[in-house]
Every structure is written in structure tokens, then in C-alpha cells.
Amino acid sequence: MRRQMLGSGFVLLAFALSSSAKEPSQDSRISLASASPQLQPVASLALSESPTSGEVEAAWASVAFTSETSIAVGVCLRDFINQKCSLVLVRWEEDTLQTFAQSLRFDPGVSLHPAGEGRILAIQGLSSAVLYSAYLCNVHDLPKQLSRFLSPSGKTVADWARGSWKLYRLGDRLEPLREGAGNLQSVSDEVVLIQDRKVMRVETLDGKQLGSFFLPSEAEGYYASAGSVGNNKLYLDDCKSVRIVDFEGRTLLKMHPRKGCSVGDTSSSADGRRMLFDFTDHKVSGLRHVLESVQTLTTLGMAGPEDVNREEVRVFDTVTGKACFDWHRGFPATYSRVRSAAISPSGVFVAIVAKDKLSMYRLPADCNESAAVPPDK
């Protein structure tokens, strides 16, 4: 995966920019990672009732805060024989985590998103979209094949095809807002980002242009996904660094979350000040690394999809550029792109699923880059 992504040029994403941060953490090569000695989870919740929980692994996970105190966790747990998927709603109160609703209607590959008023929007690729009520009592299959382009609140969604798109307001039904041409790059509840050849345009939902800028000439391909676009700021990812820019493309800040692209791996606090990066990659050492490098060369880079055995979660302050949280884990190799972390709307908490456990971390009030545990090289 990561090898293919690095060759795709720039990645462009737009986000609201302004508030929280995360805590440091450390790496583990076994299935479950632990936090750094400075910051431990403030609460944890077992997602499996199996007495042999040490043998259970999350084959797929998606996490979303539906409010500051409610978390939706979609997880597929597997042991040596079986795999069981479920959607669980968890309440976060007085430093404890408690399950208050559960549904068995969940599948690998489904991503969860808040949809306002405690509801959950579940999207599986471009094939289906399902809206769950706040307590999972009602499930509604949406008539459109909604894309990954949706606002952080989940209230503005898109039906996307290459070269054209349609925006909808998601309430009890899909209310048409606008349609247009060009490649849709990101959506918030206020603005939309559109790529037209080598130009990026920032417009309001009703079509008023707020800014535009030319893409770098060396960029071959672009991808964009938006959090809430606010304070006239966006962020650009070229797989080497992340630049905070204004609506005219002028650089305001540069960050280095890690080497590699963050396509689909990024979320932010409601005000955009704290940005969470959730990366997965493939890491081996010694002879196996040499053998894989030889295979890549002899097949001209066409060795097939790369399995994933490592996840890294980091949080940065988009005003200062400092890191607040750095968490790592290793796990049995899988071809699924596990995404197991989410940041709360306030940017104060991070929820992570590792193995069969949901853990909650409280982030420090101020990001301090020196407090984060650096990843293994």
C-alpha cells in the first residue's frame, strides 16, 4: 500500500484549524500497544466476552465520536476459528466507558461517521450507505451511493463520480443542495473544495468563490478529504510534509507527521486546531526486508498488495505545529487498512481500538513535541 501511495504525488486535504492535541505513546511489536509511561489510558472497555481475549484480534475497526461523551465503535473481532462483527455505542462518563447499545449489522470495510443528533452514518466504499438512529433502534438504507466526501459533522454528504458531483444535506432524508463539474476534493458544512485541472477552488455551498490557487507543477495526482474547513485555512500533504495554507495557497505552517501520505487517515477536532493522523504500514527487518526489496525490483514494483502489520497514531497542533500524542502498535499481518482511532470534538480525548479493547486517552492541555515518543526507525 504505502509503496503505491508514495508515487501518487501530492495529497490535498482541507480542515478547520484551531484547538486540541494528543498525548505521547510508545511502540509495541506484539498485538496490543501500550501508551508512553507519561500518559496511560484513563479508561478501557473490553469489546469481547471471550475468556481467551489474548487470542482475539481486531481484523477491522472504525471509531467515531458522535458527541463529546458518545463513541461509535464498529469492530470485526477474529480468533483462530471465527470472526464476529458488531457496532457498539459507548458512553464516556466520569472517566468510565459503558456500552449502551449494540447491533450485529456491521461488516469489514465499513467506515463510521457522526451524522448529527447522535446518529451514525456507515459507508462501505462506493457501494452502500446506512444511517443508524442514536440508539441503533432504527436502520435506514440511503438511496444514494454516498462517497467518502462528507463533512466532519456528517450533515453534508456527496454523491461523487469522476468529473461531477452532487451535494446533499443529511436529515431524515437526503435534501439536494448543489451539483457541479470538476473533481470534488473535500466537503464541510460551509465550503467545498474543487479541483479543475491544475487549479484548486474553494467555494461556499451555494457556489460563491472564496479563493483559488494553482497546484504545484510537479504534482501528478491529488486526493482531498475535508474536515470542517474554518478560519480560512486548509492543509496540503505531499507525502513528505503537511502545510497549513490559506484559501490562496499561501503557507502558514509546515508539519512533519511522518514520511508517507495520509490519504483517508486524517481527522480533526471540531475547531480544527488538533489534527489526528492514523497511519498503517508494513514493517519487517533483516533478511525479509532484503528479500522483499529484491522482489519489488524484479517485478518492477508489481509485487501485489502489501500487507499491513503496524499502526501509528499521532496528533499535532495546527497552530504551533507541535506534537501532542504518538502511539504505535504492531499486529498480525493483514491486507485490511485498519483505522482504529478518533479524536473527540473538543480535541481533549482520543479513542483507540487495539486488539479487543477500546481505550480512552486524555490529551495534555498544551502540545509539547519533546513529550511524544518517536517512532522506531
Image (cartoon, rainbow, N blue to C red):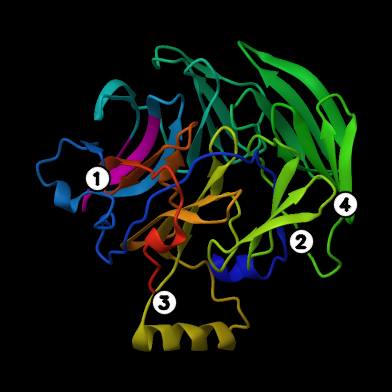
Please state the horizontal and vertical placement of residue 327, each as a whole percent of the image: 37, 56
Query: What residue sits 67% from the left and 56% below the top?
Result: 253
User: Element type at marker 2?
Assistant: loop
First of labels 1, 4 by sequence position: 1
Residue assigned mark 4: 213
Disc 1 packing (10 Å; few <14; some 14–19; many ≥20): few
Residue assigned mark 1: 82
Toward which corner of the image does residue 64 lie, by quadrant? Answer: top left
Which is more foreground, mark 2 or mark 4? 4
Mark pair 1, 2: CA separation: 40 Å
Residue type indicated by callout 3: Lys
Toward which corner of the image does residue 14 lie, by quadrant? Answer: top right
84 falls in the magenta region:
yes
User: Element type at marker 1?
Assistant: loop
First of labels 1, 3 by sequence position: 1
Residue type indicated by callout 4: Phe
Residue assigned mark 3: 377
Please state the horizontal and vertical placement of residue 214, each as a whole percent of the image: 88, 56
First of labels 2, 4 by sequence position: 4
> Which region is colored magenta?
72-85
Which is more foreground, mark 1 or mark 2? 2
Residue type indicated by callout 1: Asn
Mark pair 1, 3: CA separation: 35 Å
